[in-house]
Amino acid sequence: MEKGQTKREILNAALEMFSVQGFEATSMAQIAEAVGIRKASLYSHFESKQSILEALVQEVLRQYTAHSIFGQAAGDVPATPLTPDDAVAMIQEQVRYILHDPNISRARKMLVIEQFRNPELAVLQTKQNYTDVMRYFTSLVKALIAQGVLAQDDAELMAAQLCLPISVWINLCDREPAREQEIMALMERHIRQFFRRYQAN
């Protein structure tokens, strides 16, 4: 097995275990066994379990920035959905990505488990699940107000009203995947009601 491939398999196995049983409860021996290598060989790729975690965090951030609309750089103007249909399609596509991309999904679950034990991961959890989401939706709402799609109002509160229920529904789908279709339908009703409530006259 090539070194690069082995390293990737170690990271995949560790992320899977961290997302199910947590960082502290996972041992280097368990990771090595999952990959099918000796524990000593594992240390030739990573010097510690902490170094595996750090590599995973960097990879998660890279994927998040590359693929999540919420990970756009501060100050970027988001693509503006001019109609409720546009908004429903854009937001639901993003939610499906968040729910079904295996690395993003496992990383999110790991952050939920570790947020009360690891200060670094607590900061990352807040960034990805609140700060970036609120920043994105506040920019989106401001753009819609500027374009005359939505009425003038408190953009930050409007953004909170739009995005925070969606964050709760994502967490619910993590716990109860069978409810995804129900949640997607509820999400569509929510987005359409938001546009009706704040539509410009």
Image: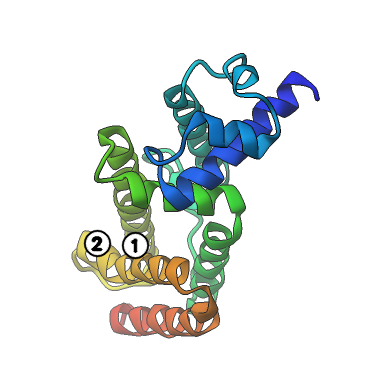
Picture coordinates of residue 103 (x, y %)?
A: 57, 47
**For the residue labelled by badge 1, is the local secondary structure a helix, a strand or a loop?**
helix
Mark carried by residue 155: 2
Answer with left or right where residue 16 lies relative to residue 201. Answer: right
Picture coordinates of residue 190 (x, y %)?
A: 38, 81
- Dots 1, 2 in contact, CB < 8 A: yes
Picture coordinates of residue 54 (x, y %)?
A: 45, 27
Q: Residue furthest right?
A: 1
Relative depth, front residue between 59 and 66 = 59
On screen, residue 180 above or below 175: below
Relative depth, front residue between 154 and 151 = 154
**Residue 157 image-quadrant placement:** bottom left
Q: Which residue is drawn at 51% across and 33% down?
A: 56
Q: Estimate the spatial distance between the alpha carbons at disc 1 and disc 2, rounded to whole Å.
A: 6 Å
Q: Which residue is drawn at 51% across and 45% down?
A: 17
Query: Callout 1: few (<14), some (14-19), or many (20+) C-alpha neighbours within 10 Å?
Result: many
Q: What residue type is labelled 2?
A: Ala
Answer with left or right where residue 73 lies relative to residue 1. Answer: left
Q: Which amino acid does label 1 sit on?
A: Val
Picture coordinates of residue 9 (x, y %)?
A: 67, 34
Query: Callout 2: few (<14), some (14-19), or many (20+) C-alpha neighbours within 10 Å?
Result: many
Along the polypeptide, which appears first: circle 1 or circle 2? 1
Query: Can residue 44 be spotted in the picture?
Result: yes
Answer with left or right where residue 169 lies relative to residue 182. Answer: left
Residue marked by disc 1: 141
On screen, residue 189 above or below 146: below
Q: Residue at x 80, y 25 (%)?
A: 1
Location of the C terminus by quadrant is bottom left
